[in-house]
Image: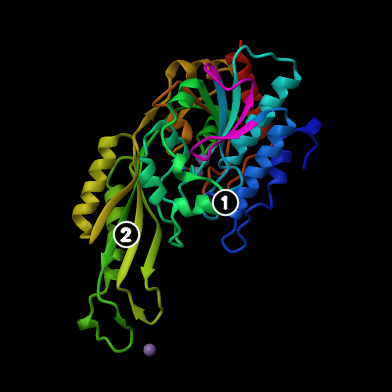
Amino acid sequence: MTPPGALDALADLDDLAEVGRDRDRGGYSRHLWDDAELELREWFRARATALGLDVEQDRNGNLWAWWGQPGPGALVTGSHLDSVPGGGAFDGPLGVVSALEAVGRLRRSGVRPERPVAVVAFAEEEGARFGIACLGSRLMTGSVDPARARALIDGDDVTLEQAGRRCGFDTDGLGPDPERVGWIEQFIELHIEQGRGLVDQGSAVGVASGILAHGRWALSFHGQGNHAGTTPMSDRDDPMIAAAQAVLAVQRVAGATSDGRATVGRMSVVPGGTNVIPSEVRLWVDVRSATDVEVRSMVAEIAAEVGATSFRQESWSGAVTFDPDLAARVAGVLGDVPILPTGAGHDAGVLSESLPTAMVFVRNPSGISHAPGEFAEAADCAAGVAALETALRDLLR
Ligand code: HGY
Ligand code: MN
Ligand code: MN
Ligand code: MN
């Protein structure tokens, strides 16, 4: 553990380097309330407490570290600690460690804010365990029904409610938290860029202009399970064929658009035996584009083509335009850095529906994310912390 006096975002990431390392897939697997994510939560509490911040967990499982009495007018910064399966080290945690580092620097420099400041770590941003992206911030803002959330089931048929109970978190309190949302005057999230925009523009940091519309749909294809050796090809009702055709349809529909994106990154075969014709194949589609209408049109075209037994929306995020004044103010105080869009969803996108929100991006040389190869240079991470500190200092003036 890095001693408080030598706080440094990268040292913090080093502290976390072994937490949730995925030996099979590479990268990190840190999912809501699993051992790795619970360890990250404990790390956050210890780190924030060492900074002199007051840590609390809200009714939706989000962690808040307060500088000053929680209440109206709050300037909030932070991100998430969870990952996708086999994800990178930076997506999420870089925003949290940078926020702690920046707030630590403001405190040590003698800043005396006239309003509350908080660092937040939102729960289940990736939706990797229970399927809904940005679950913690959506529950807080009331855009996900708490009863639906409690009943969500993970890949091991564990409900969110059971998972919460196993780690001592009572999910009976899940739900809208309008008072807390009302406390937040501005939210600013630092994040590694998931793309090469800053590389192309030659800047270590940038500011987000908006987020693509995006959603997730669960498809299932039913057939007749049977024996792989005793069932002639002419006698089969094999759902894998329809599922394979659906993957090709997803690729074709997205490929025919100007900049739409659609991905089948997850599939499950029931029962999953090598010598068994499946009885069911489930797959999940992630569809994104510049506008809600474009996404809906792509999804309708896919649904019409694939003939799935069931086709269910799991998660939806409309296109986001961040507060232009706040984006311009942050970009300006950082020396007129680039303002650019992103295809990646964020809790900042969820909050932008309720309050002025901005994002600071840190250059990612390869642009790779949601994969072990995700990386940001130390100098750029340091530039990110300095930028966040500058932006926070400016907003606290
Ligand atoms: O999926 C996303 O865009 C984000 O990384 N959760
Ligand atoms: Mn992500
Ligand atoms: Mn993220
Ligand atoms: Mn047999």
Residue placed under numbered mark 2 in the picture: 247
Mark 1 or 2: the one toward you: 1
Q: Is tag 1's residue or tag 2's residue first in the polypeptide sequence?
A: 1
Residue appearing at x 61%, y 35% in the figure:
96
Left or right? Give the position of 199 relative to 385. Answer: left
Which of the 4 image quadrants contains residue 111?
top right
**Dot 1: within a 10 Å radius of its alpha carbon, few (fewer than 14), some, or many (20 or more) residues?**
few
Q: Is residue 71 above or below residue 213?
A: above
In magenta segment, residue 66: yes
At numbered mark 1, what does the secondary structure look like: helix, strand or loop? loop
User: Considering depth in this image, is 23 or 312 the residue closer to the camera?
Assistant: 312
Q: Which one is nearer the viewer's eye here, 35 or 386?
A: 35
Numbered disc 2: secondary structure? helix
- For label 1, being within 8 Å of ligand 3 is answered no
Q: Give the range drawn in magenta.
A: 55-74
Question: What is the three-letter code of the residue carrying label 2?
Answer: Val
Q: Name the quadrant where ligand 4 sits.
A: bottom left
The picture places residue 264, in percent across and down from the top left corner, at 37, 55
Q: How far apart are marks 1 and 2 (CA)?
A: 37 Å
Q: Mark 1 points at which residue?
A: 167
Q: Is mark 2 within 8 Å of ligand 1?
A: no
Residue drawn at (48%, 17%) of the image: 326
Against 111, residue 313 (above or below) is: below
Q: Residue 390: in sight, yes or no?
A: yes
